Image (cartoon, grey):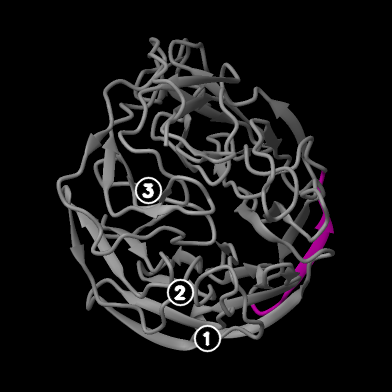
Amino acid sequence: MGGAPDGGRDSGSPEGTWEKVATSLSTSRGLFTSLPHAITASDGRVLFVGGASSTAKDALDLFANGSFTAGTSLGTPRQQPGVISLADGSVLVAGGSTGGQHGSAIASVERWNPATGLWTTLGALDKARNKPPLARMVDGRIFVVGGEVAMGSFVSAIELIDPSQNFAVSTAGALTLGRSGHVATPLADGRIFVAGGVDGSSTAPVATEIFTPGVTGTVGTLTAGPSMTNSHLGTNAARLPNGGFIIAGGCTGGQKCPTASATCDAYNPVSGQAGTFVACEGMKSASAAHAMILLPTGRVLVAGGFQGSTSLTRVEVYDPVTNQWTLVRSLNESRYDAGIALTSEEKVIIAGGRTGALTSPTYLASAEMFDPGPPTMCTICQLDGACQILAAGTPCDDGSPSTTGETCKGDGVCAP
């Protein structure tokens, strides 16, 4: 299927093109995680875990030094589980489903040891759930929120997994509304922001909730957050250098995604307070199920996705300094529900996914890489936690009384 046009480059855009990776995933698949991304381990290897084609997969593919190798399979095949790196460098996988539109939700939890390359089954969540986003709390506990038991049946329960207590699972309250296809984004002050997704209504909710963790051994509290200006389902959030995040595109009309959106919401954090959402410039092309990632340059990249019955090759980059999206070089293959990550060389890799119409997709094993270039902006934070993003060449203050006349350098550092 075709995609958006190749859209040229400007002086503020990443240079280069997407290059095909010579090796591929061990099996064609997409739907790797609860959100379209892959996991970078502490040793720099990128993990593409599980996923599905016609059924859920147990495959693990590891990318390093420009090529893929097959790793030890999961104990349980699973589509769209929650996946997250732990403080000790291992990787945790929780939930997911047995695959397909009517697959059964999974409760089991597994941990991958980078030293041995093996998976260990740790136990189970209290609530089986597909598509649960995971977030790592400041004290190392893992926050598990929402998801779905089956299509149209949503989970509101929150659970915490504690690696320091032999991965014990405890309950931590519930969302006001059960939701699936949402994001759970950690903030700089330790709180976790839950936004987007679908709750069974005809439109995706704009309401958000904020979880404030308690001290270790206690649960924490859940409060209402500010409403988004637009609804977003089937997308991802990208942290910005100032501690906020953007959420862009996705579906606007229920779980079957009748309409893809180009809208963008930016969250401006205020430490200990609710903060605010503002509408950022919309993407050049509406899409859902695209890959989204924060680049080392401080910009945000969105690649692929689908719009109606068309899968996309288009790639856009958002600049938080100018609040503008720019079309850059397109993917070689259109894809959605792919995995995306940064390699140890700080290049972008995107692999797998689906191409073609949602009703009859073709699953991919291919991968592509992109070099976004060096940092081009600085983040300056004040004592109250407020942060500002500045473009290279802009006057700034590094906070040192012994220096004056600093500017934001091309390497992202504020210096004389």
- The image shows residue 285 at horizontal and vertical percentages of 56, 27
Looking at the picture, which amino acid does disc 2 mark?
A: Arg
Report the Cα–Cα distance between label 1 and label 2: 25 Å
Label 2: which residue? 78
- The residue at 47%/51% (across/down) is 337
- Tell me the distance, in whole angstroms, between the alpha carbons under discs 3 and 1: 30 Å
Q: Is residue 84 left or right of residue 321?
A: left
Of residues 246 and 51, the one nearer the viewer is 51
Helix, strand or loop under label 1: helix
Q: What stretch is highlighted in magenta?
A: 217-226
Counting from the top left corner in percent of width and height, residue 10 is at 40, 10
Residue 134 in the image: above or below residue 113: above
Query: Which residue is label 3 attached to?
Result: 341
Assign the C terminus to one quadrant of the image.
top left
> At numbered mark 2, what does the secondary structure look like: helix, strand or loop?
loop
Q: Quadrant of residue 267?
A: top right
Q: Disc 1 marks which residue? A: 165
Residue lying at 34% horizontally and 61% vertically, measured from the top left: 48
Q: Is residue 91 above or below residue 276?
A: below
The kind of residue tagged 1 is Gln
Helix, strand or loop at label 3? It is strand
Q: Is residue 87 above or below residue 388?
A: below
To which quarter of the image does residue 287 belong?
top right
